[in-house]
Amino acid sequence: MRKVFPMLLMFICVVTSSFSQEINELDFLTSGKWQVESVQIGEEVQNYSNDNSWMVFHADGKYQVVMSDDERSGNWKFEEATKVIKFEEDESLFEGLKIELLNKKELLFSATEGDIVYTMKLRK
């Protein structure tokens, strides 16, 4: 019995900490407007210095994206196991956006289309 209690306590701590980490990722992602700082396509980098390019991920599964004068919206979902965001209406991003970095201040996505690698850096 003495060995069972510490093992049970350790199991509860591990499950609780991993669950809270997943919740924090979704909380960070859905915490408001993310300003697009830069987009890199292959070797070419496009910097965005003003606030006319942004993304918002709503907790109800809706999203809005504004890139300069182009606006899109639709539904998104987060695949926890692979850390990928998929847009249901956009077949051009079939594989989705892979989250490389996510915290309260920064968000870094990557995506591939054929041989081309895209990265997008956003900030709060």
Image (cartoon, rainbow, N blue to C red):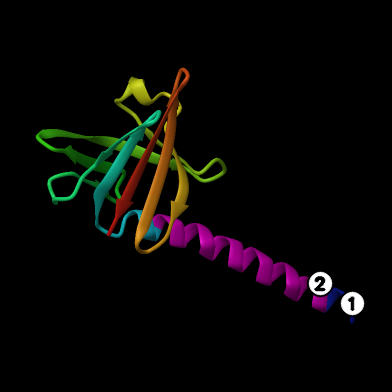
Say which quarter of the image contains residue 16: bottom right
Quadrant showing the C terminus? bottom left
Q: Position of residue 84 (x, y in %)?
A: 47, 39
Say which quarter of the image contains residue 82: top right
Can you name the residue that lies furthest to the front here? 43
Q: Amino acid at mark 1?
A: Lys
Q: Amino acid at mark 2?
A: Met
Say which quarter of the image contains residue 3: bottom right
* Residue 20 on the magenta segment: yes
User: What residue is shown at x 42% (from left), y 60% (from top)?
Assistant: 103
- Is residue 124 shown left or right of residue 26? left
Magenta span: chief secondary structure: helix
The stretch in magenta equals: 6-26
**For residue 83, above or below residue 14:** above
Residue matched to label 1: 3
- Is residue 26 shown left or right of residue 31? right
How many dots with numbers? 2
**For residue 90, above or below residue 37:** above
User: What residue is shown at x 9% (from left), y 35% (from top)?
Assistant: 69
Whether residues under marks 2 and 1 lie with C-beta atoms below 8 angstroms apart, the answer is yes
User: What residue is shown at x 35% (from left), y 20% (from top)?
Assistant: 91
In three-dimensional space, the C-alpha distance between marks 2 and 1, rounded to whole angstroms, equals 6 Å
**For residue 9, above or below residue 66:** below
Residue matched to label 2: 7
Relative depth, front residue between 3 and 116: 116
Can you name the residue that lies furthest to the left here? 69
